[in-house]
């Protein structure tokens, strides 16, 4: 960079050169986006693939269904607890190293879980001991795998201007939805030979290892926005990011949204089984469960495809802003939940679930991008950590929805619909949610680029 010196000895940069340098600021490259997209899809494929075969693993080894469900609950709880820690490490360790940590945790966890399943299938231990080891091995992912999400989100936020962030965040969310489709389809292909039900776990561990190598070799992390060590007074202020008035509404919205989405996903399977049983009462239970499982898979794939339609079709086509996403997302999700609650058969329930999934897919990038825009660039890592925390802790509320379903089947879906309708009203009435993104102007985007230029120059000193 070329500087000139004034007569008083002070160096300065001519405006023309400054504008030229700002225009040359590195942005989110195509290669970096493809790598982060692949990382998100890899973890989604592995997690959903594992979830699809885990019931069969539990039945084959003799682990009780409730104990199988507890495996994911502990992992999600640890994910929620560790996400803020990894978010704090972003400024100290960098984004790329934490992606590597997350992928390593995913690969190691999958490999160890595969070894535990192989031991259980070979009757080398009792089901209770196998469950204990499986619980610990899966917990590794909750502790270390949670480093990937805040690192990826912060990486993108730092390399996109506010007006473009919704599109890029939606594309990454689409990677997870695509993994939701691919995972359950891909997992059965690896149930082969001596590996049996452990085969998919070994395969997912290998895929994650390959992605780890790709990230290490090909993902560039130029010092686009290196955060300087904060002053003592700044540390106190940054600790209060959860309580900032312009940030808290998005966390409240996101938490309740995640609770409703998870509760719907957890109870839908039971509803479809009961609807199938009512439609085919003459079938024995084994054949009935086989048919119902097929209907559940159709519902999951339909929901994932609806999410892809929202993320890769509706959002870019209509250039939907966070404010619009928050409203349409909650409204459609509420309508879909009502349709599930009133469904006379499993086909209607599947349609309702797809509509609700469409709404959730719209609302999720709405509140994530809104939260990102509500804080300064230096707090992007903390925002990502807070979002990771609420996306994990909400799983603890899903068993209550299942218990409510056992008392009165439509009850949890009606309750979810009421909460989502409340979120729609909240998005319309809250000043913060109502005005999100309205101040993103060309002047602010120039300031954004100038900030990047300043940090890039400081890092090169």
Image: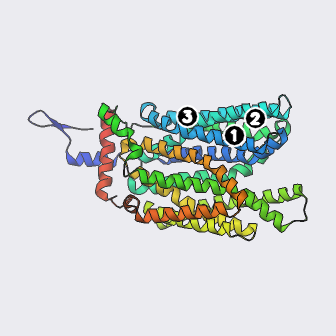
Q: CA distance from mark 1 to mark 3?
A: 24 Å
Q: Secondary structure at mark 2?
A: helix
Q: CA distance from mark 3 to mark 2?
A: 28 Å
Circle 3 Cα neighbour tier, 10 Å, few/some/many (<14 / 14–19 / ≥20):
many
Q: Is residue 233 visible?
A: yes
Q: Which mark is residue 131?
A: 2
Q: Is residue 209 visible?
A: no
Q: Secondary structure at mark 3?
A: helix
3 and 2 marks in contact (CB < 8 Å)? no
2 and 1 marks in contact (CB < 8 Å)? yes
Q: First in sequence: mark 2 or mark 1?
A: 1
Q: Is residue 417 above or below residue 112?
A: below
Q: Is residue 7 above or below residue 327?
A: above
- Seen as rendered, the residue at the extreme top is 124
Quarter of the picture holding the C terminus: top left
Circle 2 Cα neighbour tier, 10 Å, few/some/many (<14 / 14–19 / ≥20):
many
Q: First in sequence: mark 3 or mark 2?
A: 3
On the picture, is 204 further left or further right than 333?
right
User: Which residue is label 1 attached to?
Assistant: 71
Q: Which mark is residue 100?
A: 3
* Residue 20 coordinates in the image, percent (x, y): 28, 48
Q: CA distance from mark 2 to mark 1?
A: 8 Å
């Amino acid at each position: 960079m070329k500087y000139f010196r004034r007569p008083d000895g002070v160096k300065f940069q001519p405006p023309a050169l400054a504008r030229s340098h700002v225009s040359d600021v590195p942005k989110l490259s195509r290669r970096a986006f493809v790598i982060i997209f692949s990382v998100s899809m890899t973890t989604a494929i592995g997690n959903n693939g594992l979830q699809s075969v885990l019931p069969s693993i539990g039945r084959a080894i003799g682990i009780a269904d409730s104990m199988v469900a507890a495996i994911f609950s502990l992992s999600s709880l640890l994910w929620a607890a560790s996400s803020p820690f990894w978010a704090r490490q972003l400024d100290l360790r960098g984004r790329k190293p934490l992606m590597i940590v997350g992928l390593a945790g995913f690969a190691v966890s999958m490999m160890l879980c595969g070894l535990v399943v192989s031991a259980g299938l070979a009757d080398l231990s009792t089901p209770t001991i196998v469950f204990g080891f499986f619980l610990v091995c899966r917990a590794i992912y909750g502790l270390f795998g949670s480093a990937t999400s805040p690192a990826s989100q912060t990486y993108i936020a730092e390399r996109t201007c506010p007006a473009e962030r919704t599109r890029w965040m939606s594309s990454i969310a689409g990677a997870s939805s695509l993994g939701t489709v691919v995972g359950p389809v891909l997992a059965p292909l690896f149930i082969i030979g001596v590996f049996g039900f452990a085969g998919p776990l070994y395969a997912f561990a290998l895929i994650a290892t390959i992605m780890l190598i790709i990230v290490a070799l090909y993902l560039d992390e130029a010092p686009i926005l290196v955060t300087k060590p904060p002053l003592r007074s700044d540390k106190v202020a940054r600790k209060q990011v959860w309580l900032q008035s312009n940030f808290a509404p998005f966390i409240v919205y996101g938490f309740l949204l995640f609770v409703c989405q998870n509760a719907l996903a957890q109870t839908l399977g039971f509803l479809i089984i009961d609807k199938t049983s009512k439609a085919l009462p003459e079938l024995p239970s084994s054949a009935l469960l086989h048919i119902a499982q097929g209907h559940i898979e159709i519902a999951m794939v339909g929901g994932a495809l609806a999410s892809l339609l929202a993320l890769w079709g509706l959002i870019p086509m209509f250039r939907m802003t966070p404010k619009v996403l928050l409203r349409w997302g909650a409204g459609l999700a509420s309508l879909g939940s009502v349709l599930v609650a009133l469904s006379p058969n499993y086909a209607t329930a599947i349609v309702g679930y797809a509509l609700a999934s469409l709404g959730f897919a719209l609302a999720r990038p709405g509140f994530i991008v809104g939260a990102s825009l509500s804080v300064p660039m230096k707090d992007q890592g903390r925002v990502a950590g807070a979002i990771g925390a609420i996306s994990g802790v909400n799983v603890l509320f899903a068993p209550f929805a299942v218990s409510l379903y056992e008392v009165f089947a439509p009850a949890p879906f009606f309750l979810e619909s009421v909460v989502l309708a409340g979120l729609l009203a909240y998005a319309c009435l809250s000043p913060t949610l109502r005005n999100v993104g309205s101040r993103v102007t060309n002047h602010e985007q120039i300031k954004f680029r100038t900030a990047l230029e300043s940090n890039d120059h400081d890092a090169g000193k």
